[in-house]
Image: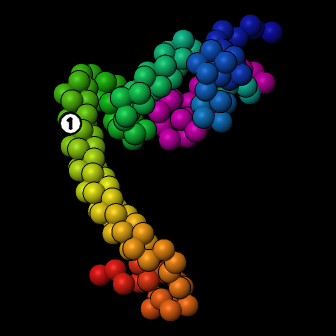
Amino acid sequence: MVQAKGLLIGELSQQVNLSKQTIRYYERIGLLDPPQRTNSGYRLYSNEEKERLEFIQKAKNFGLSLEEIKTLIELRTKGILPCASLERMLKQHLDDLDQHIAEMIALRQELASRHQQIKSVLSNNHKINQKSSSGKICSFIEQDK
């Protein structure tokens, strides 16, 4: 029987600190090529696949989605350096993040304003009679426009 060269999925999983399920998932979505198989059908991974998995993990640290990572891998496989694409992706992420931060700041200001209004009403009326409140549940929310 010929000794197979490479890593079994469990060995690879430990070396790259990814679950076996994640490695199989990456195969299914095309981030990894299907590995060679041993005579008994076990997956056998080369050092190239290990390096690919390490690249994927590092790319995720850039905030890239798996689809974006796949795009970079496909470009490189075609002989195209993907650095310009990476720059565009990161710029889009930054723009999206800036927009999200602006929205969160606006939401925080709105909530702080509402909190102050409610706090003021509650401090002026030490005991609010919930039965006389015009709202079914909480008039502060129901009166909101």
Q: Secondary structure at mark 1?
A: helix
Q: Is residue 84 left or right of residue 139?
A: left
User: Is 115 located above or below residue 30 in the figure?
Assistant: below
**Circle 1 crowding by C-alpha within 10 Å: few under 14, some 14–19, many from 20:** few
Q: Which residue is mark 1?
A: 91
Observer-nearest residue: 75 or 127?
A: 127
Image x and y of residue 37, in percent: 67, 24
Q: How is the image coloured?
A: rainbow
**Magenta stretch contains residue 27:** yes
Where is the N terminus found, in terms of image quarters?
top right
Residue placed most toward the observer, 12 or 134: 134
Q: Position of residue 7 (x, y in %)?
A: 66, 14
Q: Is residue 53 visible?
A: yes
Q: Kindly identify the amino acid type of the residue bearing the numbered disc 1.
A: Lys
Residue 34 among those drawn in magenta: yes
Residue 45 in sight in this render: no
Place residue 58 in its image quadrant. Answer: top left
- Residue 10 coordinates in the image, percent (x, y): 71, 22
Instruction: Write the residue at 50% across / 92% down.
Output: 132
- Residue placed at 74% from the left, 27% from the top? 41
Q: Which residues are magenta?
A: 24-40
Name the residue: 45% across, 91% down: 134
Question: What residue is drawn where x is 67% and y is 18%?
Answer: 14
- Vertical placement of residue 119 versus 11, above or below: below
Q: Quadrant of residue 111?
A: bottom left
**Direction from residue 103 to residue 30 in the image, left or right:** right
Q: Which x, y percent locates residue 145?
A: 29, 81
